[in-house]
Image (tube, helix red, strand yellow):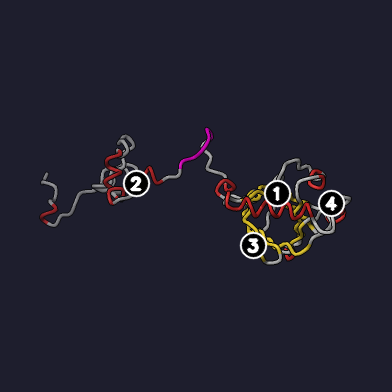
Amino acid sequence: MGRPPSPMRGGGFGPRPDGPPNMFPPRGRSRSPNRPPPGGDMMRKRDRSWERGGPPPDMMRRPFNGPGGLPDSPRMMEPRPYDTPSEWNFELKRSGKVKCRCSATSLSVGLNRQLPLYLDVVALPHLNKSAEFLQLERPNVRRVVYELKPESMADSRGYREFVDYLIQGRGGHARAGGAAEMDPQGFKVFILPPGQAARQLGYKGDHMIVVLRSR
């Protein structure tokens, strides 16, 4: 018998051995099931973006919270709601003339409104009629109460003078101060000196209070 034809002599290759398809994959593409997966070093060689200033690939994944491995709830990623202000600093005026600067602290839930930078007292209702202008007989009317103090020691004198001004009043009748800066937002503003009228709203301190009353 002669020798099998050589591919160098134009005889071509011999027939493939019998077997199922894909049993003999092309060279360089072996995918043996017994071959272990590439290690961490090999994976880093394939993606070297972490060497160019960024974090390693594993650090770019957002960690999951909780034992179940669940991602963060979308609600937790929402911006925080607006915080209602409990402190309010403003300039106190009487008919346009500055008396002092005041610092007001909410005694209840603050008001979710834009608070003015000054209050100009332009009305002086009788203090003994506070139940009427505060509408205490109407439970559905909203009233936000702030305790009013001088902003600094330099404001103490003007603050005290305004307290005395309301208590002495006019014609022997104590007064409250009325301002209109929050009328466009649907609130009347009243400033009360310490005393019986303020105690009707639950305040027993020695300072003035500001009442924002809804219309």
Q: Measure the alpha-carbon separation of dots 1 and 4.
A: 19 Å
Q: Residues within 10 Å of mark 4 (few under 14, many from 20)?
A: few
**Mark 1: amino acid:** Tyr
Q: In this picture, which residue range is highlighted in magenta?
A: 63-68
Residue 41: numbered disc: none
Residue hosting label 4 = 140
Amino acid type indicated by mark 2? Pro
Do the CB atoms of the residues marked 3 and 2 lie less than 8 Å apart? no
In magenta stretch: residue 56: no
In this rendering, position of residue 45 left or right of residue 157: left
Confirm or deny contact between disc 1 and disc 2 (CB under 8 A): no
Marker disc for residue 55:
2
Q: Identify the residue position indicated by label 1 in the image.
A: 146
Residue bearing the label numbered 3:
98
The location of residue 198, given as percent across then percent down, is 78, 46
Secondary structure that dominates the magenta span: loop
> What is the spatial separation of the Cα atoms under label 3 and label 2, in whole angstroms?
58 Å
In the shown orientation, is residue 51 left or right of residue 61? Answer: left
Residue at x 13% of width, y 51% of height: 5
The residues tagged by marks 1 and 3 sit, at their Cα atoms, a distance apart of 20 Å
Quadrant placement of the C terminus = bottom right
Residue 175 lies, in percent from the top left, at 80, 55
Q: Secondary structure at mark 2?
A: loop
In the image shown, does 124 or 64 lie closer to the viewer?
A: 124
Say which quarter of the image contains residue 173: bottom right
Nearest to viewer (mark 3 / mark 2): 3
Residue under the image location 52 percent in, 42 percent down: 71
